[in-house]
Amino acid sequence: MALVRYVAAAAEAAGTAAEQVPASTVGELRAQVLTRHGGELAQVMAGCAFVVDGVRSDDATHLGPSDVVDVLPGG
């Protein structure tokens, strides 16, 4: 499971600063967190960057069990 860390407005919309998410790609992770948190987070995430272990990533990026994914608004 990847550790997802939400920053600023993303944390407010998700209602948490961090959570574990079982996903094999960033796209799968995005879908899972939107299912969990929905509406407001979907609006915020439209303008977010996903940074995996310090590297800006896209939906096709594969995730390992120890990866850390930062969700950064304004990305």
Image (cartoon, rainbow, N blue to C red):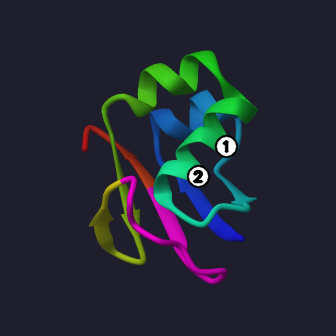
Neighbour tally class for label 1: few under 14, some 14-19, many 20 plus, Cα within 10 Å:
some
The image position of residue 2, as x and y in percent, is: 64, 69
Query: Relative to 49, is 10 on the left or the right?
Result: right
Q: Which of the image's four quarters has the C terminus? A: top left
- Tell me the kind of residue under disc 2: Leu
* Disc 1 from disc 2: Cα separation: 5 Å
Q: Which mark is residue 32?
A: 1
Depth order, front residue of 38/14 = 38
Secondary structure of residue under mark 2: helix
Residue 63 in the magenta stretch? The answer is: yes
Do tag 1 and tag 2 residues touch (Cβ < 8 Å)? yes
Q: Quadrant of residue 52?
A: bottom left
Neighbour tally class for label 2: few under 14, some 14-19, many 20 plus, Cα within 10 Å:
many
Q: Which mark is residue 29?
A: 2
Residue at (58% x, 52% y) in the render: 29
Instruction: Give above or below for 35 relative to 57.
Output: above
Depth order, front residue of 35/40 = 35
The image position of residue 47, as x and y in percent, is: 31, 32
- Tell me the kind of residue under disc 1: Gln
Residue at (73% x, 62% y) in the render: 22
Magenta segment boundaries in residue numbering: 59-70
